Image: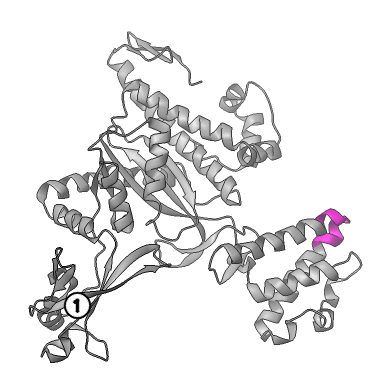
Amino acid sequence: MLDRVRPSRAIARNVRENIVYMYLAEKLQPDFRTISDFRKENENLITEMFKNTVKAAKDLGVIGLEQLSTDGSIVKASASKNSTVTKDVLEIVGEYVKNELKKGIEIDKVEDEHFGNCRGYDQLNKSEKYKVKAVAAKYIKQVNQEKSDDRKKEIEETVKEALNEFEKDSIEKVSLTDQESRFMKNKKGTFELAYNTQITVDHKLGIIVANDVCQDRSDMYQLKPQIELVEENCGQLKEGTKICADSGYCSGNNIHYLNYKKLDPYIPEKKEATKTETENAEDNRFDIGNFEYDEENDEFICPENQKLKFLYEGYEEKRKRKYRLYKGTECKKCEFSKNCTKRKDGIRHLKIAEFSKERKQLADKMKTEDAKKIFGQRKQVVEPAIGNYKENLGFRDFFTRGLKSVRNEFNLVCTAANLRKIWIYLIKMSERGEKIEINGAFRLKKGIMNRMQIS
């Protein structure tokens, strides 16, 4: 991992040919399938390995837990866009696999007549019918080659799992090679099948203290899980611990959560689309930030000194948040109603998200020079950590498939990144002739590293 060798076949070859790998493997020569299966099947062991690197760094005193930064990065999944299908196509393929797929069917005979009895096939367009035939032909070839009913059962299970993904998430297409991957927008602005990787880094030495992989296309709902993982790995965070994250994590729920835990958040608000100078002059006066809230009467006062009364409380399913709606009382009489709202009835409505007061307090804090300086340190810590494992370790795409397996793979990447940080730190201490003793795990004396062991 540290030398950018990640494929299981390449590792298996190095164990036979590279003296460094031979030494580390103690002359064992595992098959590439054994290496591949290890990454997929040893979730607890791999998780514990990562936690041990965090514990070792903490024992060394290179984790301060005074300031943490969280960030996410899109990593390409081991799946092709060509392997995706819509729900309608998948249901027909599933029905065909269940009832018709047999060893004796020839690939070149996959025609419309074979799908005539499949419900909904006649309603598909030309492109979708072609997709059904292509997928069926692929599965027929696999069954014919392997001469086994086991492969047919595997295909049935693949289709079933893919259909479950439609029920679990509101997606338009699902991949047949990695059903749990999702279409996400990468840095180039194109959409690809990928996963969203998350890390939290301590500011003292840049050690990754928590990591995870999720299917969310945005980072908004990942801050709380990251803080929970940090406390699982490092213990309870102290009051006032600084938490830095970019605007993608800005939400009332996240801010309220950090305030509830008495942590110190530094999260900027999302930048809105820029307006023309004319629009700024006329419309900015009626931005929601210019409406004053009267807490005693639970109402808002607009820039024209008119009241907006509470109407009702609702819930946004997409954003997973509560909100309160306020309605103007004298808008129809106001000469500026057209500048204030685009509603046809000319009455201004304010949708106030839950914890808006805490959001405003944070927004005001982020305008201060101290807050800008603290938040600016995030770019020097978490972004280099992401750049390190992407550029130096060559981790730009996953080799395994499925959420559980890619989490294992990413845990190994973060483990390698932490070990490298610890190793460099120990070498520097050794060069300075410093002695370090941490629970018998590390001993350095007179510039010589006598023993290094992570158990």
Q: Position of residue 31 (x, y in %)?
A: 71, 35
Residue at 15 percent of width and 63 percent of height: 295
**Mark 1 — residue?**
275
**Which is more toward the observer, 176 or 300?**
300
Vertical comparison of 183 with 408: above or below: below
Q: Position of residue 156 (x, y in %)?
A: 76, 61
Secondary structure of residue under mark 1: loop
**Which is more toward the observer, 145 or 174?**
174
Q: Which amino acid is tagged 1?
A: Lys
Q: Position of residue 159 (x, y in %)?
A: 71, 63
Vertical comparison of 30 with 95: above or below: above
In magenta segment, residue 48: no
Query: Which secondary structure is most common in the magenta stretch?
Result: helix
Q: Position of residue 399 (x, y in %)?
A: 58, 49
| Colour setup of the view | one colour
Q: Residue furthest top?
A: 446
Asked if residue 419 lies left or right of residue 138, the reply is left
Q: How many marks?
A: 1
Asked if residue 108 lies left or right of residue 43, the reply is right
Q: Which residues are magenta?
A: 142-151
Residue 176 appears anywhere in the view:
no
